[in-house]
Image (tube, grey):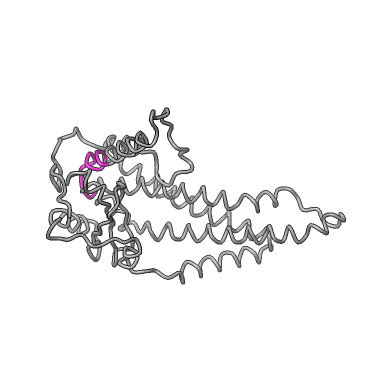
Amino acid sequence: MKQKTRKHHHWVNRIQTVLLLISMAGLLSVLGWFLAGPAGIKAAMIVTVLAFVFTPRLPSRLVMRSMNARPLNPRVTAELHTIARQLARKAGLETNPVLYYLPTAKLNAFAVGDGKDSAIGITHGLLSALNTREMAGILSHEITHIKNKDMEVMALSAVFGRITGYLSVAGQILLVLSLPLMLVGQTLPSLLPLLFVVLAPAASTMLYLALSRTREFEADLGSITLLNDPHALALALSKVEQFNTRSWKRLFIPMPARQDHTPLLQSHPLTRERIRRLLAMAPPPKPGKSSLGSGRRVVLL
């Protein structure tokens, strides 16, 4: 039953990803058609493809360096590096991702690059808060992002969004330039194209965020496959959520009634929903047990 549930979620995520990318391409195409007819559609698609293909891909080390990150010392965090190597091998990556340390109290981890050149950034706050088992859950999630080429998927969707924004601005400029003709009654554009030109960037952003949430769900699912321990990531997410809640308490005294951010405006799904899905595919919990890692704290630099 658990395997069937995993397959169901996997196919739902895959279908949603394809539909969202098609929707972004369709949105851009309609905008191009409103501005220049069939030629506008062709031009928009050609520019998008060229922008995606020729956008420079920075090496992962340069991306990390721009964030003031430094490689984690493998002699100090040997167990963490061992876990990352085992997960990368199980995921079929060509090279092991390089682990980087970011000196910030925020609880965060992220992946950059692809299967040939990848890196995972881990903050000081995350290393301080999580034990090795929970860090294994985080690493399996990030390595799944690399395996699934999610950075490339999101880069393509970002290009769709940028070109949509440029065309929207161009359309609004043309609208302003045509105001004199409107005032003398020589041309009266219909309301639908005007609304579409103005609202297209916002719609593209909403689709981008929806795609990001879908890829996060898929990375959670992949972490289960790699680690075979859904509780590891669920426990890590729960700690991160608790930390964020305490941070708000420190800012607001007394703390106002907590309200979740609008889900549609978030790049990540609600944490409680992620945990619910993870636990729905988990066997009965065995505290401290995992196929990789232990319940000990990670040794910090």
Q: Residue at left 57%, top 49%? A: 202
Is 233 placed above or below 100 here? above
Residue 56 is left or right of residue 37, and the answer is left
Where, quadrant-wise, is the C terminus in this rendering? Answer: bottom left
For residue 231, which quarter of the picture?
top left
Residue 194 is left or right of residue 286, and the answer is right
**Residue 254, how many percent across, how many down?**
39, 28
Is 289 placed above or below 55 here? above
Q: Nearer the viewer, residue 88 or 247?
A: 247
The magenta span reads 225-236
**Residue 167, how many percent across, how many down?**
62, 61
User: Magenta segment: does it hold 61?
Assistant: no
Q: How many marks?
A: 0
Q: Nearer the viewer, residue 214 or 130?
A: 130
Q: Residue at left 84%, top 54%? A: 183
Farthest residue to the right: give it.
Answer: 184
**Residue 26, how many percent across, how many down?**
57, 55
> Is the stretch drawn in magenta largely helix, strand or loop?
helix
Where, quadrant-wise, is the N terminus in this rendering? Answer: top left
